[in-house]
Image (cartoon, rainbow, N blue to C red):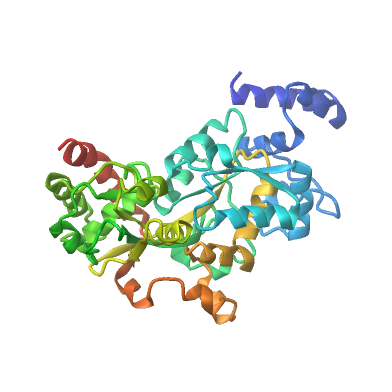
Amino acid sequence: MSSRELFNNFLDLSRAGSRRSFLKQAGALGVSATAFGAFLQACGGGNSSSGTGAGAAPNPANLAGPIDLKTLAENAKKEGKLEAIGIPPEWADYKDILAGYTKNYGVDVAYKAEAEFSSAQELEVFKKSKQHPHGDIGDVGFSFGPTVISQGLVSPYKHAHWDDIEDDLKDPQGNWCTEYWGAQAFVINTDLVKKPPTSFKELLAGDYKNMVGIDGDPRQATDAFNAVYAAALATSGSIDNIQPGIDYFVQLKKKGSFTVARSSLANITKGEVAIAIMWDYLGLGFRDQLNGKPNIKVVIPSDGSIAGPYVSIINKTAPHPYAARLWNEYIFSDEGQLFYLTGYAHPARYKKLVAAGKVPADLAAKLPPAEQYNSVKFVSDPAKLKAATDLVNQNWQSQVLGQ
């Protein structure tokens, strides 16, 4: 049965009897009241006449937010859990964020099965959710923002700290919002690399046979895509032209420096990737986790680095829509944002936190020297990101992997 047929059947049921009878029959079809509410909203059939008094669910028309924490928490507890897609605990200190959410609000989080999903895989979960609701929230790369809107995969929500986020780091309608950003860095195993490169130029010129890796396939993984973009900025490319970045990896491959091994913690630990080009916060987290076994140095390349924002999205057919919105409130709260910084990511509200004196000095001191970030650039124009993405999708296989 298609989703439209199911929707029409439910409409017939609702007309035929009382609300109690209707919900009983809906339950017999295996659809919870919460999931059905989300389903109605996704199909455009939501009823906007429900009350918003104490103990009642907010009017569906007001789900765009912000919604007060008490109302969100009460409804999230009724829903019973949050399904988080693409939220790896080792990434940007999500371990503490996940634990903090459950501790503060008493809502368990299901995330382990799909924690390591790439941005593209997260979108596939949301697509399949149209038939079988699954997955409440995601954390995807900035370049996927226009995609989730054009494919109708997300539900808008403006959290309580919406005005703290710069305009070019959020969708004006609330469909996505930057939580944090990172900068492309060299994450170097100095037990194996005795002369660590400080620039893309040095990396290409040096003797680093089979040592250089990126974090996955740039056609699917945002981290890897931005490694290519950073290489473009460091050479003859620009924000408008990523092709020199592809050419750079062609040269690395021909020289024998580039390995297709992913720059994961396991591969860096084993020495299969001795120089990883990836987000600074991942490298800094690896450095702390490995604790000298092996020794890790994190360097922001002096000739170019690109900043990569990650954005929070809420599934349009989320089975737990209030838990999803409560998650958004938490990750943009002072506590949630400081957890990102603990994980070495740069929280979107960082300037506000600094101005309010809420950033511990010892935490800020663990980051690379501030001057290393002088060459970091943002690409916030969706059209330019799409053009760059299209070019990588077109040329990566034939020009880099095919060599």
Task: Using residue 80 as the reference point, say whether residue 122 is left or right of it.
Answer: left
Residue 122 x %, y %:
49, 40
Say which of 352 and 198 sits in front: 198
Instruction: Tell me if residue 188 comes above or below residue 256 in the rendering.
Output: below
Q: Where is residue 159 drawn, in percent x and y? A: 62, 60
The count of marks equals 0
Q: Residue furthest top?
A: 1
Residue 402, percent across and down? 18, 35
- Which picture quadrant has residue 79? top right
Choose between 342 and 9: the one closer to the eye: 342
Question: Relative to residue 302, is residue 22 depicted above or below?
Answer: above
Q: Quadrant of the C terminus?
A: top left
Of the pair 378 and 297, the residue shown nearer to us: 297
Q: Quadrant of residue 306?
A: bottom left
Residue located at (52% from left, 73% from top): 363
Can residue 327 be seen from the camera position used here? yes
Residue depicted at 55% across the width and 44% down the height: 154
Which quadrant is home to the N terminus? top right
Q: Residue at x 77, y 47 (%)?
A: 77
Q: Is residue 325 above or below residue 340?
A: above
| Residue 158 visible here | no
Tell me if 373 is positioned left or right of 309 in this view.
left
Res. 160 image quadrant: bottom right
In percent of width and height, residue 67 lies at 71, 58
Q: Residue at x 63, y 66 (%)?
A: 335
Question: Taking 143 as reference, is 167 left or right?
Answer: right
